[in-house]
Amino acid sequence: MATHKTENIRNLALVGQSGAGKSTLIEALLAKTGTIKTMGSHQRGSLVTDFDPLEKLHQHSLDSAIVGFEYDGVHCNFIDTPGYPDFRGPTLAAMAAVETTAIVINAQSGIELSTRRLMQRAVDRKLCRMIIINKIDTDTVDLTQLVRKIRAEFGNQCLPINLPADNHSTVRDCFFHTEGETDIFSLSAAHDEINDQVAEVDDELMDIYLEQGELNREQLHQAFEIALRQGHLVPICFVSAKSGAGIDELLKFCKRLAPNPFEGNPPPFLKGEGENAVAVSAEPDADAHVIAHVFKITNDPFSA
């Protein structure tokens, strides 16, 4: 059995309204990393995470499902969660198992009721947050307006970390890069805006930024993690799970910038019962005693 160092692990939960394309996005990630040969679909009942007969029948997720894959030396654990409010329990439970909640938004449908509620749940749990705008290649979508609505709804800390380009057929990074044509906004302006936001979390770093006008990758990474933990930054990624646009950029984001268990906010635990219970900080430590939180139990009536 493969072992992975804590700093090389990324744990993310994909949450959002039904129809946002979370399960298909998982398929695209698995296909891109070579974990599966071809993508499945709801119509064929061949999705990796929707394996239950009822999920195949109704063509939507009923329970959370976990997938793991390797990408460029990093082990990624993604939890696919149900989108319908009737099955919200597994979605909320999955948030206890990750450092990052990725709120997936259908580019055509925009912000929906579940989007708001799950975003607030992630805030309440002090999880690092990101927004993934899926289905960017859908006809008649207005991504510029959608980003503006997201910022108006959830705050100006929501900023694109990459931008769609070439008529929404690809995506270009605007965190580490300053040049390139895009379909919406200016790549250089988006770069400056997100770097300004990141530098604000550290006064000393801000002084360096103001003096030099730029920060190196190591300085950016450290400040980025702090901004995520504090909720000072909610990066926005653009993808199309169907066409594959932005999938490679999303994987690079997970490797370079998504927090590992050392970098995320520690999960809340209570020691004791009732009025005698006290809060315990569970910092990752391979040499310490195991503290576990069971977030999913499955009962298979056909198992021996």
Image: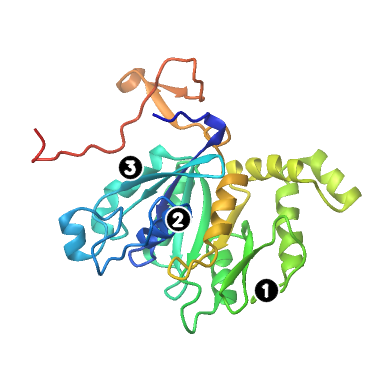
Crowdedness of circle 2 by 10 Å Cα count: few (<14), some, many (20+)? many
Q: Nearer the viewer, residue 207 or 131?
A: 131
Residue position marked by numbered label 3 in the rendering: 93
Q: Could you tell me how far apart the alpha carbons at marks 3 and 2 are, in whole angstroms?
A: 23 Å
The residue tagged 2 is 29
Circle nearer the N terminus (3, 2): 2
Instruction: Determine which residue is flagged by label 1.
Output: 182
Q: Decide: is 302 above or below 17.
A: above
Front residue of 219 and 84: 219
**In what element is the residue under mark 2?**
helix
Marker disc for residue 10: none
Circles 2 and 1: CB distance less than 8 Å?
no
Task: Measure the C-alpha gap from mark 3 to mark 1.
Answer: 38 Å
- Measured Cα–Cα span from mark 2 to mark 1: 23 Å
Q: Amino acid at mark 2?
A: Leu
Question: In terms of secondary structure, where does tag 1 sit?
Answer: loop
- Which residue type carries mark 1? Thr
Left or right, residue 8 beside residue 25: right
Mark earlier in primary sequence (3, 1): 3
